[in-house]
Image (tube, rainbow, N blue to C red):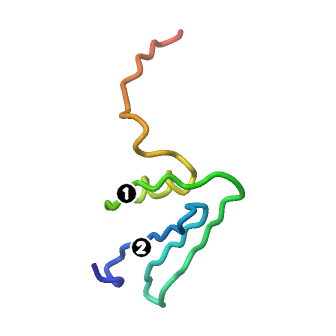
Amino acid sequence: MSPLSGSVFVFFNRGRDKVKLLWWDRHGFWLAYKRLERGHFRRPGHKQLELAELWLLLEGVELSARKPRAVRCERVA
């Protein structure tokens, strides 16, 4: 993978309470850093993530918890 391809590279520390994101735009490299006050990030393993999955991961949502299921909704008049 080339850093110039538009990919975002994600790096966690051992304690998984800090994460760094590295990506390229037309002006140069960007580095974002996030540190949690408590808790830790749930690392999804070595796989490619969609952008929406990355944002959920950074918000603390565990991606591998369960499969989504259909919810039955009834209309209320």
Is 45 positioned to the left or the right of 36 in the image?
left
When the figure is inspected, residue 57 is found, relative to residue 31, above or below; the finding is: above
Count every numbered label the image shows and give the total.
Answer: 2
As drawn, the label of residue 9 is 2
Q: Quadrant of the N terminus?
A: bottom left
Image location (x, y in percent) of residue 71: 41, 21
**Labelled pair 1, 2 in contact (Cβ < 8 Å):** no
Mark 2 belongs to which amino acid? Phe
Residue at the limit of the structure toward the bottom, as seen here: 27
Q: Residue at the spot x=30%, y=83% of the render?
A: 2
Image location (x, y in percent) of residue 24: 43, 82
Image location (x, y in percent) of residue 76: 52, 11
- Label 2 neighbour load within 10 Å: few <14, some 14-19, many 20+: some
For discs 1 and 2, the disc positioned in front in the rendered view: 1
Q: Earlier in the sequence, mark 1 or mark 2?
A: 2
Residue at the limit of the structure toward the right, as seen here: 37
Mark 1 belongs to which amino acid? Gly
Q: Residue at the spot x=53%, y=66% of the render?
A: 14
Residue at the limit of the structure toward the front, as seen here: 14
As drawn, the label of residue 66 is none
Distance of label 1 from label 2 (alpha carbons): 13 Å
Residue identifier under label 1: 45
Badge 1 marks a residue whose secondary structure is loop
The image quarter containing residue 72 is top left
